[in-house]
Image: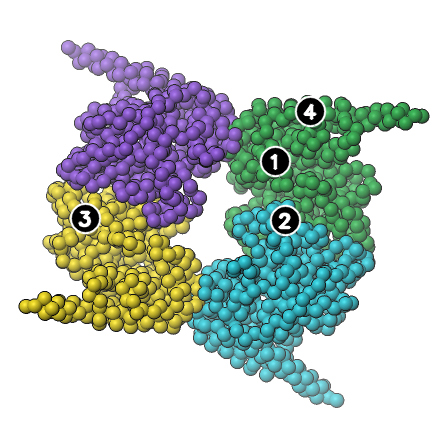
Chain colours: A yellow, B cyan, C green, D purple
């Protein structure tokens, strides 16, 4: 076959490949818009705390990501809609430009929601044009960035659920985001069981030879020695956590990390975030409004501090991330994800042979601080800021939650939040020495 | 004439009177909506600092005022639209109920803008029904409250202009509120002139025998001895204030009150609020966007601290409110009010015989702290909280501004703000010993 | 008589005059040291809040005053002990140099207490030398500054009592400053009586023609019209204030200024400063330790906010400073001053003909904000910063207290504190319309 | 041998043992007093930031430790000097009682320095009596607590140096703590060299079978897999760090962790703590006053954030604590400790075969967050609060410093500080992949 013929074939293959990516792109982008469909324009505007971003900003920022990292560098014909957006919708890429101050994102009424959707459509059209006729020279890099940009948008989908929940929770009217979510299954869980793992050298982290995408912070597959341990067969439930509350868990410093106890007192914590007692019954605010707490469902919206205090109280501890990953490698990647459409953690039957609910329901706090793996290397350029610069002051969470897209999670995935954060769908599972 | 006939006549007269009030009510209410007409729903949502309220909240609160103080007490048939609104839209009437926390007004996306306008229409219909067929027993009190409720709404009209300006000013895109305001007249003002007043006992405050409404804080007409003084024939201009800036006014503590200098340093003040230098030319943000500063127009958006520092620098002082009122009693109540539709202070020809621009353009900081007049009495009930409880930590301003309705102002009117506040349309005029 | 003879006589007279001033200087200086005699070196070091200065700093600063404003300008032979002290012990004279940051005064362990007393002795020797052989050309100015420097030191004597009390009160051991103060007299006060004053033009402020010293802020004797009023025949007592507490005064916002109520909530105020309940009996911390509250003594260590709230609650108000001065002009200047050595306000018999306890016991909050009198002029040079620059955000108090030297006070004396301040010996007296 | 004889021998042996411990106790106690000898009473009082304690408090607290954990439980005849001290000098043992608030330690002037030394002597006498005639039943536990109490006091000896330095550094007079420290040796260090270590399973942590004391946080000797790595042959020097400064290291966010860059901006960091530029030459404040920076000495008083930023800038990283311990196991425990009496890190010749300056000079930031080892168990009772409750938000440092007693350090010793802390003698060493 002639070289030209070979190249023609290669180009055709590349174009097919690019078109497949375009379909993926369209699926992910559509999912974001579905999440926002129940919102009023007013909901799009609120920044209920500095950590929360107005949904309008999310909508714009995830589009900006493709503009900044794909269209501007690789699509010469691309014309920006408004040059000021590059400043407004840059989240934290300081090597790219000066980002608009995060705590002020809720101060900006223009561009309006309609403007932002126009911006979004503008990006989508350009991405479509680019991927329908991709420049061969850059195709590989374009797809690499798409491979990052789509999980990036999925992360913001989960953030949208977290932020919308937090925004609506400020309102004494307890507004309902959606009243048609899938009803939670009813299960009565029994006593906690344990699974034992022996000591040994374990391979931790994503193997670049493995199929599928992973973030830079999962890379550097390496060896860790994991001493023998046991892990609980399910996450701690609301019912169990309620016993801790009733035993005065929030009243006495005995079980708390020093910083944790200081936070309890400064913030006046008496229960997980979103919990309120009404006529002696604990309710919690959900995306479907205020409902009674299901005692068999995993406890959610607790901080690392609360997880540690509970573990101390029962004489156990949190698993390290290496322990968690060791267990998770053998567990099928199923669970209560966003596709199940519960939008809250739910009770589940506990399997016999393997720990249950490792994936989905709640992100599980581990006992590991978020630090780089051996040989960690940031991505080149501004994308190097994606994960690495946050490796201080945060704890690792594993396994995804009820607001995570099912195809976004994997056993090596490292999520992270500061130890006091509670607005993520975060719960925990116990471990103990083997 | 029979008693019944007399009563019938009285009733007819009362009803006529009530209808006249209804027309006034409708005029004032319509003016509020005109102010908000150029806003997007997103603009309605922003609370750019704790002192600022989202326009949506203003729209609701001024309606709530009539609901809480007129409809609920005097219109038995009245049905509230949503009982939760009483909490959400109560500003600061703690004897009425627990107001929703002021700094969180921007956190509440529902009721939406449309909901709030529905609430507004609901109140308007009820007020119309009430005033078309008023209960004779309560008519006097109803009208007394209307007489307070309409100026109350006019105050919020001015606050709307202040708050909208502050909200849009947060946005690096410098959005334009209206591009069709009346163009400012061009005048070149000359050197400052002075008018002298002799010493004597003056009557200060609103005379209850006088025609027309006044707030409780203007009441208690009383005598004050005013020593001989002189007052400037116009407010200090942008051009004059610019000389102060250029002379290093913001760099040296020499002319400042101690609290003022601390504020300059803490806030990094270098010029009045909304001023920015672009290529060596001072511009300021206005409701029509960013425009060059007119050197002949009164300086605006300065704090009491800046006014005092400027006065010290030129060897003058601010007038007391008694001095200001002594002068203003003889000045015709004309000026650059909201009806002139400039929505900013403008240059004006200086009259020969009397000080110019006493009314309109800019609220003028006086040297007087806001304290009660002799014999001050608050209104009965929750309305007693209207003015009296703010008589600490604030300075009096006089004369109204370019955002004040012309029929809202009078010579005895006492406005007040903390000495550091700058987001009102506030300027100043000099005085000196006689 | 020859001119030379006349000059010789004049010089001799001047020198006698200077020596008399030297004796006064020595008396005032000695009084400061007497106040500090019971202190340990450790007590000298504490800055219990930014408003409080370590006693060591007071000792040094009042000496610095004479160095900076008398010795350096008028005594060419003067040699400073350490040039760095000029920065360390400058309080707030920004036109003199950059003062050491006020909140950090407690951070400076060196110079030590011994060093600071050496500095003090050094200044005293130089002042003695200067006043024993004063330069005729500057004598007048030297004595003018001495006339200011001695009351300045007396003000710091009172501040020392306030600050020492606040410092020791931080200590859970309730240390006793002195256990040998004069025991308080026992009086049971009866119901409050009133004295009426008619309306009229009053002369307010210190007359420069009058004998005796006054601060610049009392100057500009001028006319004020004072409407008819009544004033209470004694200050409000602890017993009366306790009724306010028991009636829920600190629990309901109804009687409070808006800023006052915010302060009550932010600070958790439940009673005057230094009050603690022990086994159902109210005690308060005094310079003699913790003792039960004398119900007949004037209430003390209350803020302006508390004074206003109490007055609102009983349907009265605070007097203006013009009213207070009108009354005080006719009252003999006697009372419970520092010389009585109670070091706390005490119960007293109420005279028939004139209001009692106008002077001494407690500084009385007036309803007047601290602003300049007509024609107010600051002193020339850096001493112009003495009073004028604090004329914002403060309220006037009158009459001196149990920690004030008796010869320091007068009817025109204007003391001032922010409305939330409580660590001064501050109480109040009621007034009402005439 | 009869049982009685055996017991007598045992008792004699125990008593000998106890006496040996008494001598150790006396040595450690004396060392604390030597550190404080150059202080004035005023120096003893200052708390220059919440992390710093007044030296007076240290003196008392280390005595309190023996009172609370040895004398009160095991010496029935013991009589406390003042029962209030138990509250005042409890640092953070919340299960023991409510500690006096840490940030207010500088507010307490009584007990005085003399009182506190009396308290100290009182404890010493009781400890002497106890150890001279120890109760056999509790001897083992008494010695166990002594074995903890002496290192505890040694930690406070180092804290005393850190705190005294910070206290004196607040003073613009730059006071000298001691002018007779051992002069630093002069060495010119060359380019950085590296030592390589191969991958393998390593034993980490203190072996309970090993001789000698270790804290609970070093316990749980366990296995870690350490991948191949290289470590620098000496810490980073002042000269090298100066290049980072000159290259704009503090001006650009590129090399910083996100939290680190936020701290740089909030605190205005431009150089390590205590550095000041004088006429173009960098000086730093030391316990001997302000001296020029020795470019060959290890950089000191840098935060973890600065260490990480520097490492990023040169393309290296910090070692993990497992790497550091792997290296340190083979390095002789010598270095610039407190006994060398430099009281600052100094330049040193670099050995060929092993990394130099692993012990002493500067605590070395590792890249490891401070978390428990597998099987970590806190001590029983209140002493369980000693280390475990601080295992959040802190990074591990290794190796001791110029203010550490030489017999206090070991290869497994885990020190910890928050990533922004700079007042410890903290520097760092580079590592990279093997």
Residue matched to label 1: C90
**Along the line of sight, the residue nearer the viewer: B398 or D114:** B398
How far apart marks 3 and 2 lie (CA) works out to 61 Å
Q: Residue at x 67, y 25 (%)?
A: C78
The chain letter under disc 4 is C
The circle drawn on residue C77 is: 4
**Along the line of sight, the residue nearer the viewer: A357 or B170:** B170
Outermost left residue = A1
Q: Looking at the image, is mark 1 or mark 4 nearer the viewer? A: 4
Q: Position of residue B79 (x, y in %)?
A: 49, 76
Secondary structure under tag 1 reads loop
Q: Quadrant of the C terminus of chain B?
A: bottom right
Secondary structure under tag 3 reads loop
In the image, is residue B99 above or below residue D246? below
Q: Please say if the residues under marks 1 and 2 sit with CB atoms less than 8 Å apart.
A: no
Residue matched to label 3: A220
Q: Are marks 4 and 2 on the same chain?
A: no
Q: Residue at x 59, y 60 (%)?
A: B301
Q: Earlier in the sequence, mark 1 or mark 4?
A: 4
Number of residues whose C-alpha sits closer than 10 Å to that of mark 4, classed few (under 14), some (14–19) or many (20 or more): few
How far apart marks 3 and 1 lie (CA) works out to 61 Å
Secondary structure under tag 4 reads loop
Whether residue C368 sits left or right of residue B91 in the image: it is right
Q: Looking at the image, is mark 4 or mark 2 nearer the viewer? A: 4
Residue matched to label 2: B256
In the image, is residue D323 above or below residue A348? above
In the image, is residue A319 above or below residue D339? below
Which picture quadrant has residue C335? top right
How far apart marks 4 and 2 lie (CA) works out to 35 Å
Which picture quadrant has residue D274? top left
Q: Quadrant of the N terminus of chain B?
A: bottom right
Q: Are marks 3 and 2 on the same chain?
A: no
């Amino acid at each position: 076959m002639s070289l030209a013929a070979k190249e023609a074939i290669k180009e055709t293959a590349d174009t097919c490949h690019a078109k497949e990516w375009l379909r993926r792109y369209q699926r992910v982008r559509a999912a974001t818009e579905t999440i926002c469909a129940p919102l009023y324009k007013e909901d799009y505007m609120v920044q209920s705390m500095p950590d929360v971003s107005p949904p309008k900003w999310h909508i714009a920022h995830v589009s900006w990501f493709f503009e900044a990292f794909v269209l501007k560098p690789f699509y010469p014909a691309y014309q920006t809609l408004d040059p000021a957006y590059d400043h407004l919708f840059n989240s934290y890429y300081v090597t790219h430009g000066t980002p608009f101050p995060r705590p002020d994102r809720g101060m900006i009424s223009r561009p309006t929601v309609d403007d932002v959707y126009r911006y979004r459509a503008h990006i989508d059209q350009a991405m479509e044009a680019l991927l329908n006729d991709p420049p061969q020279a850059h195709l590989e890099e374009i797809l690499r960035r798409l491979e990052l940009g789509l999980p990036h948008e999925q992360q913001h989908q989960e953030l949208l659920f977290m932020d919308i929940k937090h925004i609506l929770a400020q309102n004494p009217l307890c507004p309902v985001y959606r009243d048609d979510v899938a009803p939670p299954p009813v299960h009565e869980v029994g006593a906690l069981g344990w699974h034992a793992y022996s000591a040994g050298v374990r391979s931790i982290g994503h193997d670049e030879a493995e199929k599928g995408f992973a973030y830079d912070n999962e890379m550097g597959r390496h060896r860790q020695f994991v001493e023998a341990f046991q892990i609980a067969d399910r996450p701690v439930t609301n019912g169990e956590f309620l016993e801790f509350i009733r035993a005065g868990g929030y009243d006495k410093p005995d079980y708390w990390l020093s910083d944790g106890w200081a936070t309890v007192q400064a913030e006046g914590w008496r229960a997980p975030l979103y919990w309120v007692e009404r006529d002696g019954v604990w309710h919690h605010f959900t995306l479907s409004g205020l409902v009674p707490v299901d005692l068999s469902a995993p406890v959610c919206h607790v901080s690392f501090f609360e997880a540690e205090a509970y573990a101390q109280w029962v004489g156990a501890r949190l698993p390290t991330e290496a322990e968690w990953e060791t267990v998770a490698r053998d567990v099928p990647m199923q669970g209560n994800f966003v596709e199940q459409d519960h939008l809250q953690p739910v009770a589940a039957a506990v399997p016999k042979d393997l720990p249950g609910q490792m994936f989905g329901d709640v992100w599980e706090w581990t006992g590991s601080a978020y630090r780089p793996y051996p040989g960690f290397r940031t991505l080149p350029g501004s994308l190097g800021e994606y994960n690495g610069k946050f490796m201080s002051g945060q704890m690792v969470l594993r396994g995804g939650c009820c607001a995570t897209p099912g195809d976004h999670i994997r056993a090596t995935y490292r999520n992270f939040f500061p130890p006091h954060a509670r607005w993520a769908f975060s719960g925990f599972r116990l471990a103990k020495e083997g």
